Image (cartoon, rainbow, N blue to C red):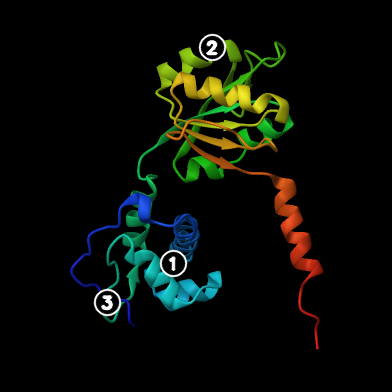
Amino acid sequence: MSDAKEKPADPAPESSVPKAVVSRLSLYLRELQHLVRDGHETTSSTQLGKVLGFTDAQVRKDLAYFGQFGYPGIGYRCDELIREIRRILGTHRAWPVAMVGAGNLGRALLGYKGFEQQGFRVVAAFDIDAGKVGQHIEGVPVYNFDRLAEVVREQAIQLAIVAVPAAAAQAVAEKLVAAGVEGVLNFAPVTLSLPEHVQTVGVDLAIELEQLSFAVVNRPEKV
């Protein structure tokens, strides 16, 4: 195998790592976790790339932003590479997360077990509906939105998920930032305008379906 482990390179500054590379790290992590569950101890850049649709050169290039992780004649040790990628992504520690919006989407997200499996634990949900406040949804307490700053401070929350209607998303996000939240995952179909130091990721499910429909409509004709 060509995944030789050499003297570790100095990691690239965070600002110089393309977002696409970080996205692929998450894909590598999921595949490595699948390999471990299936009983595999090692893998290679060729095997990782093949299952994910990337070249082995792309896999090695992505990982090289952060050092050298392979071994001559072995490739990558799955458990070791999982630990390294989790450290790079910051998920080697547990992250308390706030959820704003306990409607249909919020409830579905609160029931998603994948968050906790990857190191994210929703510890508090918020809503303005008095009928929801005081409830526990999937074991998560629902607080009145007026208590946002208090609970964020008490729970040392840095990450939050926004699952409210588009018209309310900007105001909700601003209150999260004012409370000390530094990262926002936004499920509302609107682009947020927040300070530069706040990291935001938008998930618009309709856009994802639009991309899928484009791919289907424009797929190559079968011979």
**Label 1, label 2: how many angstroms apart (C-alpha)?**
46 Å
**Label 1, label 3: how many angstroms apart (C-alpha)?**
23 Å
Q: Are marks 1 and 3 in contact (CB under 8 Å)?
A: no
Q: Is tag 1's residue or tag 2's residue first in the polypeptide sequence?
A: 1
The image shows residue 210 at horizontal and vertical percentages of: 76, 55
**Label 2, label 3: how many angstroms apart (C-alpha)?**
53 Å
Q: Is tag 1's residue or tag 3's residue first in the polypeptide sequence?
A: 3
Residue corresponding to mark 3: 4
- Select label 1 or label 2 by which is in front: 2
Residue sitting at 27 percent across and 67 percent down? 68
- Could you say which quadrant of the image residue 110 lies in? top right
Residue corresponding to mark 2: 147
Given the image, on which type of amino acid does mark 1 rest? Gly
Given the image, on which type of amino acid does mark 2 rest? Arg
Given the image, on which type of amino acid does mark 3 rest? Ala
Residue 165 left/right relative to 222: left
Residue 208 left/right relative to 171: right
Q: Does the image show residue 152?
A: yes
In terms of secondary structure, where does tag 1 sit? loop
Residue sitting farthest toward the bottom = 223
Residue corresponding to mark 1: 39
The image shows residue 170 at horizontal and vertical percentages of: 62, 27
The numbered disc on residue 175 is none
- Of the 4 image quadrants, the one containing the N terminus is bottom left
Q: Does the image show residue 42?
A: no
- Of the 4 image quadrants, the one containing the C terminus is bottom right
Image height of 6 relative to 204, above or below: below
Residues packed near mark 2 inside 10 Å, few (<14), some (14 to 19) or many (20 plus)? few
